[in-house]
Image (cartoon, grey):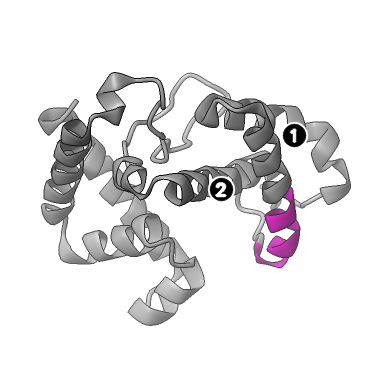
Amino acid sequence: MAPHRLQPDNWVDNYADYLYNYAVGRVSNSEVAKDLVSETFLSALKSAKNFKGDAAERTWLIAILKRKVIDYYRKINSNKGKAEVRISYASGTDTDGDWLEEQVADPFSNFENSAIENEELGLAIQKCISKLPKKQALVFNMKTIQGISTDDICNELEINPSNLWVMIHRARTSLMDCLNENWF
């Protein structure tokens, strides 16, 4: 299969509505969602040289947008940053295979705004992470929680990107299973 190529001139026409709907579903604010989509396009342009073509353009843009949503919630409420690693797996949709680890708390939900529930979830996540093999836990923390770039992690741990993504996939699968047993 040929690698995917970026076509930034078509991004707004092809993906703006999809990205907006994704963002507004997570932040429940139209203006913030528009800003996040704009920031996504700008970030994508800045990091286009890092695009390897392994994923479709839309998948790559959604990954960037997910990070923007996380950053948004971290800025407005640092406690939500601890609770945003709710792991689930989308299936049966056109985004089959996308991990939804950046599910953000619903600001209108009593359950997700409960400090006790957030603390319990944070403890459950930490407990599940502690059960991972050491290298998987380290890679997961560095990439997903700390947001360290793939290149930096690979250089620091002397691994290649394929190994990194295999470890992250295995960590996510294990965490999903652990949280399903111990939390959800």
In this rendering, does residue 56 appear at all? no
Q: Quadrant of residue 24?
A: top right
Q: Residue furthest right?
A: 9
In this rendering, does residue 138 appear at all? yes
- Residue at horizontal 14%, vertical 41%? 124
- For the residue marked with disc 2, what is the amino acid? Lys
Per the rendered image, the range of residues in magenta is: 41-50
Q: Which mark is residue 68?
A: 2
Q: How many marks?
A: 2
Q: Image height check: is 45 above or below 150?
A: above
Label 2 and label 1: CA atoms lie apart by: 16 Å
Answer few, some or many: residues within 10 Å of disc 1's Cα (few below 14, many 20 plus, some between 14 and 19).
Answer: some
Q: Image height check: is 111 above or below 56?
A: above
Query: Circle 2 — which element?
Result: helix
- Residue at horizontal 82%, vertical 38%? 12
Q: Image height check: is 50 above or below 57?
A: below
Q: Quadrant of residue 163?
A: bottom left
- Return the residue nearer the eye: 6 or 12: 12
- For the residue marked with disc 1, what is the amino acid? Tyr
Q: Quadrant of residue 164?
A: bottom left
Q: Position of residue 55 (x, y in %)?
A: 61, 47
Query: Circle 1 — which element?
Result: helix
- Residue at horizontal 34%, vertical 77%? 157
Answer few, some or many: residues within 10 Å of disc 2's Cα (few below 14, many 20 plus, some between 14 and 19).
Answer: many
Q: Position of residue 147 (x, y in %)?
A: 43, 61
Whichever of callouts 2 and 1 sits on the residue coming sooner in the sequence is 1
Q: Image height check: is 40 above or below 165?
A: above
